Image (cartoon, rainbow, N blue to C red):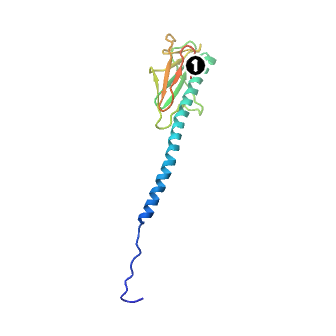
Amino acid sequence: MCATCIERPLPRGFTLPELVAVLLLVAVLAAVALPRLQGSLALREDSWREEVVASLRLARQVAVSHRRLVCASIGAAQVQLTIAAANPASACAAALAGVDGSADATRAPAGVSAAVVPAGVLYFQPDGRVTTDGPGATVADRTVSVSGAADITVVGSTAHVR
């Protein structure tokens, strides 16, 4: 090499066409991936709705088969089932374990919630009714709203869950 020659460093970074190509690739991937992601989020909400329906049906079945009062408490993120120690009863004391053995019959995934209208505990009576009180004086239809999914209706006179 010559003593008067100066070596130039190679340019670093991306060229404009490379940057545009990367942005186009990201835009195409986003257009394809976002609808699938939204579909999976809706599936998550629907699956938790089905878990709530299954828990309420379990409450009815246990109440009738054991001839005991079963209470279903639906919170924003879980459903808890409890059963009375004896019959007749006006309150539930013992927890009914969920499928996995936990105290909650089901737990909501993050970002999904539920609420009962009108608010309160659902009392599944041994004779197959749903009431607003433990002694079973007031039969009432109830609606469970699950965010992002169809409402669940519990018919008070038959405890049918749909």
Where is residue 97? Give x, y as percent: 57, 28
What residue appears at the point 46 percent right and 56 percent down from the top-left corner?
Answer: 24
Q: Which of 92 and 27 is in front in this view?
A: 27
Left or right relative to 121: residue 100: right
Where is residue 22? Give x, y as percent: 46, 59
Where is residue 143? Give x, y as percent: 49, 22
Which of the 4 image quarters holds residue 3? bottom left
Q: Residue furthest bottom?
A: 2
The reply to whether residue 103 is visible in this rendering is: no
Q: Residues within 10 Å of mark 1 (few under 14, many from 20)?
A: some
Q: Is residue 4 above or below residue 42?
A: below
Which of the 4 image quarters holds residue 86? top right
Q: Which of 42 and 100 is in front in this view?
A: 42
Q: In what quadrant of the picture does the C terminus appear?
A: top right
As shown in the figure, which amino acid type bears the numbered disc 1? His
Which residue is identified by label 1? 160
Q: Residue furthest left?
A: 4
